[in-house]
Image (cartoon, helix red, strand yellow):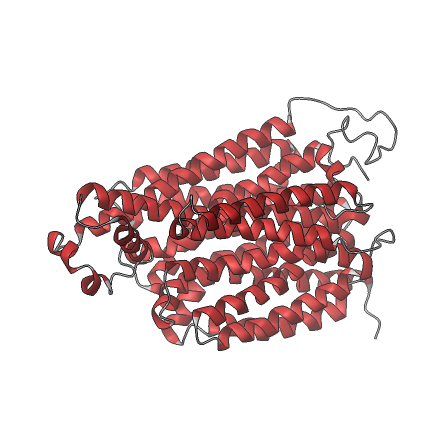
Amino acid sequence: MTISSSRKNIIALAAVCLASLMFGLEISSVPVILPTLERVLHSDFKSMQWIMNAYTIACTTVLMATGTLADRFGRRRVFVAGIAAFGVTSLLCGLAQSASILIVSRFLQGMGGGTMLICQVAVLSYQFQEGKERVKAFGMWGIIFGIGLGFGPIIGGMIVAVSNWQWVFLVHVLLSAVTLILVFSGVQESRDPHAEKLDIAGIITLSLSVFGLAYFITQGPDLGLTSIAAISIMAASVVSFLLFLVVEKKSARPMFDFSVFRIRNFSGALLGSMGMNFSFWPFMIYLPIFFQSALGYGSVAAGLSLLAYTLPTLVVPPIAERLAQKYQPGIVIPAGLFTIGLGFLLMRFGNDVGHASGLRMLPGCLLAGVGLGLTNTPVTNTTTGSVPSTRAGMASGIDMSARLITLALNIALMGFILIEGVSSYLKKIFPGVLDSLQLRSLAEKIAAGNFASLKQSYSQLLSFDSSGTAVHAALVHGFGLVMLYGGLGVWILAAASLVIFAPWKTYQCATAKCSLESDVALCGEQTCGR
């Protein structure tokens, strides 16, 4: 029986939405189980960071390669490969028996997830090209992605409570199989006829620079920030990034087409991508630690508390799309980023040392979630809608790369700030009790919520703090600095995005049909380049 075009579109949208649900669940459910993983796998704070960072760095590694491969060999074909890989590697994660094996499995899972993610946007952009249908499709995609993000924390907490942590990963094996059936039934094949070859040099140099910088931030304090090893890693990261710029400028068809950065809407939206992942998403990794360690919640209670942070991402995207159509993305995206920052500062000032509570966190969590919902879908729709449809893979690749690079680096940076904040507080209230190495080791255990091992290893310190008040206060102090960093950082990106969008200016195309090369510097409209 032949399936009608409209019915195929519905099935294709269902496939893309189910893939986005898996990706959303994988982002938001894993952080809730990190304290459990630390305990059952006998790992430390750095391992927990790398369980998340391995996934995001791997996503970044394959994103641009996937965009190019999808443009050349077919978006449906590559989408199928990504979903299958995600299912198989989720099985490997569920079977892992040590932190090191789980980190490797998470890296492989991230490669499948990145492939799957980039193809979602490319498939939607090709299959839904008309204005109203496109808005509805991206709106639905945003809602389902929000469901995965919003309910992921409570799903992860409940799985750990009623079964075991392995099923947080194994559930994706079943979902991947269903998604594949939908893809084969409804997704149309599409490709860019001008795509020729893969930019191997660009992929390698960009991936090495991101990995090196994340490794420097995470491991640098242990190596010694001024040590030869740390300086060498940082220097190699800088050289790799400079080589990436040279390679992309010389390539006949680079994976990063720098000419698109002259499109105001594209560049402004890209800063929106970076802003969301500067603060909201990396903090998602650490919030479960705050709820469970600083506030004493269990895994289910922590998951329920995280709903205040994530559920607005489910409700707000359709409203954001309508606002973007009415008031243009150049206003809505910076406003969304500003709202995220305001939420972070509310969390910071609502949780001073000695007054931390879930109730005081609630307004800031809700406001940050609303800001994310205002920003996410307009950013995606604007970046892909600002370039020709044949280059949708490249545009979505740059967008997602900006998100995941920013996410990977800020997971590491927030962890660094958290440990330094805890360490500085302990040093102030316990001067001379511990040397610098012992102090940092203690700060890492406190930051990870690993209080069980403190009594054995730090009995001398705890004799000064028998009630644990100082240890708790140190953790709250460290989190306060992380919240302050996230809020101020995203405000800076909001201001930069607003300046680049310049919604107060009007632009006119010099020709009836503007071209990507000639008029993008003159035309700031979203349709420029089509």
Residue that lies at the very extreme toward the top in this rendered image: 505
From the top left corner, tell me how far across and down residue 408 is, in percent. Answer: 52, 51
Question: Residue 88, relative to residue 420: is it above or below?
Answer: below
The percent position of residue 436, horizontal first and vertical second, equals 27, 48
Residue occupying the point 58% across, 62% down: 110
Q: Quadrant of residue 38?
A: bottom left
For residue 408, side relative to residue 63 (left or right): left
Q: Nearer the viewer, residue 523 or 286?
A: 286
Compared across the picture, whether 271 is left or right of 441 comes to: right
- Please name the residue shown 77% across and 26% down the image: 522
Specify the quadrant of the image occupied by residue 187: bottom right
Give the residue displayed 51% in from the left and 50% down from the top.
Answer: 214
Residue 232 in sight in this render: yes
- Could you tell me how many numbered marks the image carries? 0
**Above or below, 116 relative to 245:** below
Of the pair 519 and 227, the residue shown nearer to us: 227
- Please state the horizontal and vertical placement of residue 127, each as a whole percent of the image: 77, 55
Q: Is residue 18 visible?
A: no
Nearer-the-camera pick, 469 or 231: 231
User: Is the residue 431 above or below the residue 448 in the image?
Assistant: above
Q: Quadrant of the C terminus?
A: top right
- Residue 529, image x, y percentages: 80, 37
Tell me the quadrant of the picture where the N terminus can be found: bottom right
